Image (cartoon, helix red, strand yellow):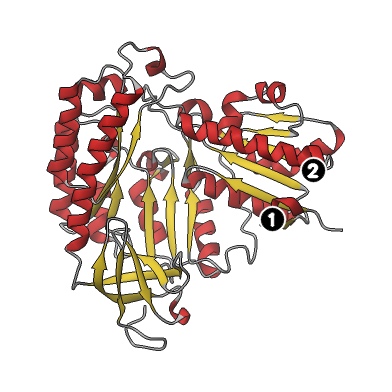
Amino acid sequence: MNHHFHIITMGCQMNEYDSDLVAQLLLSMGYLPTSDPLEADLILINTCAVRARAEQKAVSILGRVLKQKRRTPDLKVGLMGCVAQQRGGDLFKRFPELDLVLGTREVSRIREHIHSSESRSRVLATELNLQPPASPNASGYFRSRFTAFISIMEGCNNFCTYCVVPFTRGREASRSPDDIVEEAKHLVTEGVREITLLGQNVNSYSYGKEEGQCRFPLLLRKLSSLKELLRLRFTTSHPKDLSDDLIRCFVEIPNLCRHIHLPFQSGSNRILKRMNRGYTREQYIDRVRDLRQAVPSIAITSDVMVGFPGETEDEFMETLDLIRQIEFDNLYSFKYSDRNKTRSSTMSGKIDEWEKSRRLGLLQKTQKEITIRKNKSFKGAVVEVLAEGLSRKGDQLTGKTEGSKIVNFKSDSQLLGHIVKVLIKESSANSLRGECLDSAGGDQIY
């Protein structure tokens, strides 16, 4: 009788990649996936701890899953990822029914941890000194997908004062470029047409020494030559590591999407210094100018935080001013929250929740106006879209432009996996809508 597994994935794209890795390893053990947790013999929750709300949500989901375990004692339940890494054995004290606690670098050893759980009641594994694993490259796993992720490195050495990543994912460790290229080749043979390279600080990727060293721009060039790889993306970049060579890649590599996610976090130099970000407001603006001079059409998205300890009203206004100056295509914005072990959690000058919410609301209103105006400028334009799947309503196809704009359009499902031309008819704050100009078998399909 086959066992079934169900994985609940929370948070970032890195977690999505880790969940796919675990799923492939479980399939190699004879487990079968199920979308219904009530059918599962094993439930794994892959967690995020970057922000307080994400951690609270993970604990809430775990509580609900353990209620199911009390009704079906043979069910195994595991917590993976950042919350598991951060809380470790304390989770067993709060949740005695929990079977596995697997840290961020232990997910690749899921098979041995499952076997260990069969011989003893609990498994705790939170080693952070493990090297990033090679993908199992399971045949058929990605057969129905046209986009996929590849993790090229783990961890971070920056120690921004608000960030838990160095504590939950360890120090930077880059994967072999040969392993990464082999994984990309496998994905392409499975039908994947767009690959996004992942890392906590992806543009600090570096493997090897001296003459044999491979830095991030060289890795991009190696991957870009793969036949049938229509698009290549990467995230997340750090402004201080955005080199001239990387900017040239946007000009010289045809299938590298003209889009960069470049978090700035604050528009105030004093706050950036307290955050230990390693650049100034002026340096950030200069890098954006260099990007736009090289590729005028490049889309730029970013992360920003409000309410960092000690942030004054004037410093918040500096952030708003930077947003208005740069005019990002989109922003991911958050309220500051204390995270365990971080330096900012002990800083004075904490901002109350009401004020943080006020600032966040004003910031999001400002960015929404910019995004709506930018999206309206696409009306009447013809854009190239990789058809990825069905829209949420299921009556249209959906995909993204090079600049990561979501586009919905009516078309034949035979165009899935192809880049097609779409005439934009309507826009909103979140997406574009248009008419596909290509048909199955037409000459314009890539």
Residue at image mark 1: 36
Residue 357 rendering spot, x and y as whole percentages: 31, 30
The reply to whether callout 1 and callout 2 are in contact (CB within 8 Å) is: no
The answer to which quarter of the image holds residue 294 is bottom left
Q: Position of residue 359 (x, y in %)?
A: 25, 31
The quadrant of the image that shows the C terminus is bottom left
Q: CA distance from mark 1 to mark 2?
A: 13 Å
Q: Nearer the viewer, residue 134 or 423?
A: 423
Q: Secondary structure at mark 2?
A: loop
Q: Is residue 176 visible?
A: yes
Q: Residue at x 43, y 19 (%)?
A: 342
Q: Is residue 129 visible?
A: no
Which residue occupies 53% across, 63% down?
Answer: 187
Q: Which residue is mark 2?
A: 75
Report the side of 202 relative to 37 (left or right).
left
Q: Which amino acid, mark 2?
A: Leu
Q: Residue at x 13, y 36 (%)?
A: 321
Q: Residues within 10 Å of mark 2 (few under 14, many from 20)?
A: some
Residue 397 screen position, x and y as percent = 42, 72
- Under mark 1, the amino acid is Asp
- Which comes sooner in the sequence, label 1 or label 2? 1
Q: Quadrant of residue 288?
A: top left
Instruction: Give the quadrant of the N terminus.
Output: bottom right
Q: Residue at x 35, y 30 (%)?
A: 335
Q: Is residue 25 above or below residue 412?
A: above
Residue 340: % across, % down: 49, 20
- Please identify the quarter of the rendering in which residue 115 is found: top right
Other residues around mark 1 within 10 Å, as few (<14) / some (14–19) / many (≥20):
few
